[in-house]
Image (tube, rainbow, N blue to C red):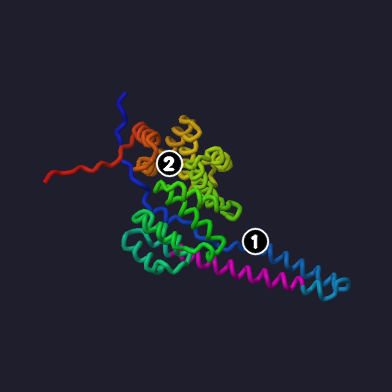
Amino acid sequence: MANPKKQKFTPKDPADALAQIETPTIRWQVLAQIAGGFAVLWVTAFMAKPMFGWWGIGVVAALTIAGAGFGIYIWRLTSKQRAILEIMKTATDPEGRQRALDQLGASGDNDAMKAVAKAQILASTDPNEALRTLEAVDLKKAPMVVQDEVRAQLTLLYLRNNRTREARTMADEMRLDRQPNAKAKAFYAAVMAEAMARTNAAEDAKKLLDTYSETDPAYAEARPMLLRAQVFTSLQLKKRGLAKKAMETLAQVEPGMLAAFMQKGTQPEIIQLAKQTLAEAGFAPKMKIKRSP
């Protein structure tokens, strides 16, 4: 039986990923439920006035003011996220990327949300600059909901540069319970697990990955990263068969990601496994041909 013709693989076009970013929206149903809860509190406070006097009403008023302030904060944060994502979606070609970077402002302004956006745009063309952009962020001054996003992106960049100790330090500071979005949480879990596996904590990495099935549709966008983490985890646990299975699935889902396994500094066993998987899947990496003068 003849072997199938080998086809070249290339990384996924970052423009496609940027165009498909989910724009955050205000959950009006949740806000309505919260407003309903405050309404109940006000009714209860007035009904209990004969017993507690104006103290009960004062407490409810204070809670209402605090809730309104928090709501305004979330609304402003969501509006800012939407504006930044709209800018990112224009970065579909070199000119668009440059315009987007210009709109996001000069580096060093310490805006964590803009830094994450700039790093995502730069990652495909200038990963070192993306890394410098994120490292310049003062996490203590960043909004709580953005801190772990910065840490996750930094962890990923450190891992891709084989800076595993720095990746593990950053991953240890992340908390999954602070991320309500299922897709983002699965992405965080993937980079955390890879950092653990590559720093002699493969058992902990496996426990974490076992809670995020790569076949779950809810984690579809994070699936390649979950599979990548499974490769490193399984190899560290001496389960080469599981590592090969994960890499074979990754070759079907996102073959371009296998190139990262073959970069300088990666374990020889992983490089060999990546080359074998690509060959068996019928893919062949692009080869540069030097022409003599």
Distance of label 2 from label 1 (alpha carbons): 35 Å
Numbered tag placed on residue 235 in the rendering: none
In this view, the residue in front, 241 or 80, is 241
The kind of secondary structure element at disc 1 is: helix
Q: Amino acid at mark 1?
A: Val
Residue 153 placement (x, y as % from top left): 46, 54
| Residue to which mark 2 is pinned | 253
Q: Which residues are magenta?
A: 59-86
* Residue at which label 1 appears: 30
Q: Residues within 10 Å of mark 2 (few under 14, many from 20)?
A: few
Residue at 30% x, 40% y is 285
Residue type beneath disc 2: Val
Instruction: Look at the image and tell me in which quarter the N terminus lies.
Output: top left
In the image: residue 202, left or right of residue 98: right
Q: In the displayed image of the protein, which residue is found farthest to the bottom?
A: 54
User: Does dot 2 land on a helix, a strand or a loop?
Assistant: helix
Residue 235 location (% of width, % of height): 46, 34
Across and down, in percent, residue 251 comes to 40, 38
Left or right of residue 43: residue 247: left
Quick one: which residue is furthest to the top in this view? 1
In this view, the residue in front, 207 or 186, is 207
Question: Which of the two labelled residues, at mark 2 and mark 1, occupies the earlier sequence position?
Answer: 1
